[in-house]
Image (cartoon, rainbow, N blue to C red):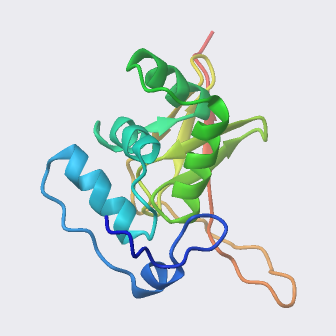
Amino acid sequence: MNDQASPLNDDGIDPAARAAGHQPALTGCPWHDVNEMLQAAGLRPTRQRMALGWLLFGKGARHLTAEMLYEEATLAKVPVSLATVYNTLNQLTDAGLLRQVSVDGTKTYFDTNVTAHHHFYLENNHELVDIPDPHLVLSKMPDVPEGYEIARIDMVVRLRKKR
């Protein structure tokens, strides 16, 4: 990264890069790919973003809470605070690299798969998993209030073990 960094807004995302939609040149090397993903999204590849990104994206599609990522970072000897983990997850979400999925309004998961899809929530072990059917549709959508449009639909189907 050079010293002539482009101006950033308050959340650390370069608006020009976001608007340009620069696609990262992925190589299969997790460290290189995280760097490319961050830069393509207009985020500076700081040490902490790189380390957390490597933990997030280096293991394929995942669903993690901030606490789960913080625990992984601690075990990997990555020196970050829980507040930094939350800030980074929110920046990656705002940049379109993660998808935020709320369960009950009390637990928020961050999904590395940002494509349109739905989830099962396994209540017994507090796990979020992708619903494998890409053709799942809602048969009737609600009327949207004047001046609004549907941005995204998140369906979470809660499952529990039979007794």
Number of callouts:
0
Q: Nearer the viewer, residue 18 or 59?
A: 18
Q: Nearer the viewer, residue 80 or 2?
A: 2
Q: Nearer the viewer, residue 18 or 64?
A: 18
Pick out the residue farthest to the front: 3
Pick out the residue farthest to the bottom: 147
Whether residue 11 is visible, yes or no, is yes
In the image, what residue occupies the spot 70% across and 73% down? 141
In the image, what residue occupies the spot 49% across and 54% down? 98
Whether residue 131 is visible, yes or no, is no
Pick out the residue farthest to the top: 163
- Look at the image and tell me in which quarter the C terminus lies: top right
In the image, what residue occupies the spot 33% across and 79% down? 22
Residue 9 at what x, y percent from top left?
62, 74
On screen, residue 81 versus residue 136, left or right, reads right
User: With respect to residue 138, does 121 lie above or below?
Assistant: above
On screen, residue 144 versus residue 138, left or right, reads right
* Res 37 quadrant in image: bottom left
Residue 133 at what x, y percent from top left?
39, 53
On screen, residue 41 versus residue 120, left or right, reads left
User: With respect to residue 131, does 143 lie above or below?
Assistant: below
In the image, what residue occupies the spot 24% across and 45% down? 31
* Res 54 quadrant in image: top left
Residue 107 at what x, y percent from top left?
70, 34
User: With respect to residue 77, does 146 lie above or below?
Assistant: below
User: With respect to residue 2, does 122 lie above or below?
Assistant: above
- Look at the image and tell me in which quarter the N terminus lies: bottom left
Residue 96 at what x, y percent from top left?
49, 65
